[in-house]
Amino acid sequence: MTEMKFHFCHRLPAGKHSMMEEKKKKHNVLVEGRVTSTFIADAISKHSSKTEIGAHAIFLGQVRRDAQKDSFVKNIEYSAHPEMAEKAFEKIREKAFKKFDMICLHIHHSIGMVDAGEVSLFVFVSCKHRAQTFGALKWLVDEIKKTVPIWKKENYENGSYKWLDGDQPPM
């Protein structure tokens, strides 16, 4: 899978076009492997020209090296049914733009192996004011965790593993 990002910026004024008319091009969320610091820095730096934005909020979900019995988390293997996951992200995006006065939104989620210490989820929200930005960011991360069908297999340094939340992908 090649690196793809999900973003939506420059909403047209209310009444001009629906969001679907405004942005017909599909933006995929899923990326193979970790979310790189270069990608995160580039996303941030590109927003300095968007002068209608007054606040940004960023969430970085990082794999923790938690202790589990006699070992530590080495990595998490994320898996998903891509079409189902992308549809879930699209629904979240549409709800978020209806619920919050956002100017820009970027979501980037890993699939495959992500080592402890690496980033697996990047959510970047831009609004006119900080209160809107913080509210939107919290809601988005909660919705992603609650509704997107992405499964997590926690692999340990001793070679054992565990599917998190007792869930594993359909075989």
Image (tube, grey):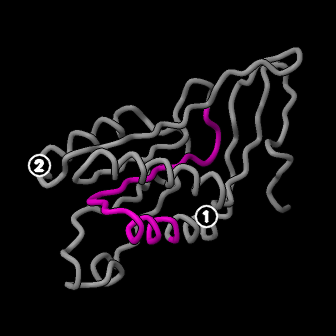
Look at the numbered disc 1 and give the secondary structure of its residue: helix
- The residue drawn where x is 14% and y is 55% is 52
Report whether 153 appears left or right of 19. right
Three-letter amino acid code of the residue under disc 2: Ser
Q: Which quarter of the picture shows residue 116?
A: top right
Measured along the vertical axis of the image, is residue 68 above or below residue 81? Answer: above
| Circle 2 crowding by C-alpha within 10 Å: few under 14, some 14–19, many from 20 | few
Q: Residue 168, how many percent across, how many down?
A: 82, 52
Residue that numbered label 1 is attached to: 85
Describe residue 28's horizontal placement relative to residue 117 as left or right. left
Q: Position of residue 136 (x, y in %)?
A: 42, 54
Residue, x 76% and y 35% (percent of image)?
Answer: 154
- Which numbered mark, 2 or 1, is in the foreground of this view? 2
Task: Identify the element where label 2 is drawn.
Answer: helix
- As for residue 117 lying within the magenta part, the answer is no
Q: Is residue 158 above or below residue 154?
A: above
Which amino acid, mark 1? Ala
Q: Nearer the viewer, residue 34 or 134?
A: 134
Which image quarter holds the C terminus? bottom right
In the picture as drawn, the residue positioned furthest to the top comes out as 70
- Comes first in the chain, label 2 or label 1: 2
Task: Name the residue: 64% across, 45% down.
Answer: 112
Q: Residue at x 35, y 74 (%)?
A: 25
Over which residues does the magenta segment extend?
91-114
Please report contact status of discs 2 and 1: CB closer than 8 Å, yes or no: no
- Alpha carbons under labels 2 and 1: distance apart: 31 Å
- Name the spot of residue 20 as percent of width and height, x first: 36, 81
Q: Where is mark 2, residue-wise?
A: 49
15 over 148 or under it: above or below: below
Tell me where residue 36 sits by quadrant.
top left
Q: How packed is label 1: few (under 14 Cα within 10 Å), some, or many (20 or more)?
A: many
